[in-house]
């Protein structure tokens, strides 16, 4: 399932939407990297409708032309939850795709499943990586003389450090809550 389809299912899990409003929300979330064209959105909606994940209901529009309200089906909700639960690969390693997963992660009802996704992201972020390499060796900012490439690495390192701290804090808080509730249970 493409990230576009995950966004559609995720936003419709929050509430039924008209295509225009759905596209607006998708662009707000993902549009900073690329816009969502009609040629991308509507074929995805059609695939999801044919697959029984989304329904379309016509209702009167402002100028007399009918408007389509999109609704998530139970099959669609199940598929979305499976996708969130099983987020791996590029959904974890690609920052834009992970932000889409993260945007809807609270829809997973089981905190342990949410935490498992966060742990996969944390594991990825803790691996040595770079945008630039000397053979197989990742280069650090201190290794570079080009100020722009150095800036890329410094920015990425700061972002990664902040994200790792946030994930650890969230996971530690969950563990603290679990320990407290276990002590309260007779």
Image (cartoon, grey):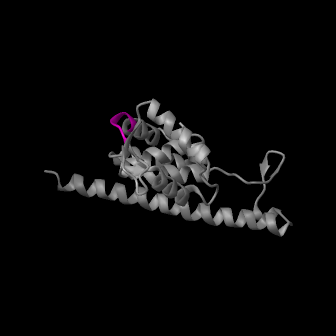
Tell me where residue 167 appears, x and y as whole percent: 48, 58
Q: Residue at x 57, y 55 (%)?
A: 30
How many numbered tags mark residues here?
0
Q: Residue at x 51, y 63 (%)?
A: 165
Residue stretch rendered in magenta on the structure: 72-76
Q: Nearer the viewer, residue 20 or 100?
A: 20
Tell me where residue 97 appears, x and y as whole percent: 57, 49
Residue 171 placement: quadrant: bottom left
- Left or right of 111: which side holds 129? right
Does the magenta run of residues contain 20? no
Tell me where residue 74 appears, x and y as whole percent: 33, 36
Q: Main secondary structure of the magenta part?
A: helix
- Left or right of 6: which side holds 70? left
Q: Residue furthest right?
A: 145
Q: Residue at x 64, y 55 (%)?
A: 34
Would residue 126 be visible to someone looking at this image?
Answer: no
Q: Residue furthest front?
A: 64
Would residue 50 be visible to someone looking at this image?
Answer: yes
Tell me where residue 124 appears, x and y as whole percent: 59, 48
Residue 140 placement: quadrant: bottom right
Q: Residue at x 73, y 54 (%)?
A: 130
Q: Is residue 148 above or below residue 15?
A: below
């Amino acid at each position: 399932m493409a990230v576009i389809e995950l966004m559609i299912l995720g936003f419709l899990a929050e509430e039924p939407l008209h295509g225009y409003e759905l596209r607006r929300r998708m662009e707000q979330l993902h549009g900073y990297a690329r816009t969502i064209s009609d040629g991308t959105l509507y074929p995805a909606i059609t695939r999801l409708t044919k697959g029984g994940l989304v329904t379309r209901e016509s209702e009167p529009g402002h100028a007399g032309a009918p408007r389509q309200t999109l609704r998530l089906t139970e099959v669609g909700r199940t598929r979305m939850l499976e996708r969130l639960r099983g987020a791996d690969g590029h959904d974890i390693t690609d920052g834009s795709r992970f932000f889409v997963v993260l945007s809807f992660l609270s829809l997973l009802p089981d905190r342990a499943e949410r935490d498992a996704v966060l742990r996969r992201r944390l594991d990825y972020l803790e691996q040595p990586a770079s945008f630039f390499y000397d053979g197989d060796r990742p280069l650090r900012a201190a290794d570079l003389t080009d100020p722009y490439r150095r800036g890329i690495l410094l920015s990425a390192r700061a972002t990664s450090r902040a994200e790792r701290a946030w994930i650890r804090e969230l996971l530690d808080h969950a563990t603290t809550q679990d320990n407290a509730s276990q002590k309260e249970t007779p």
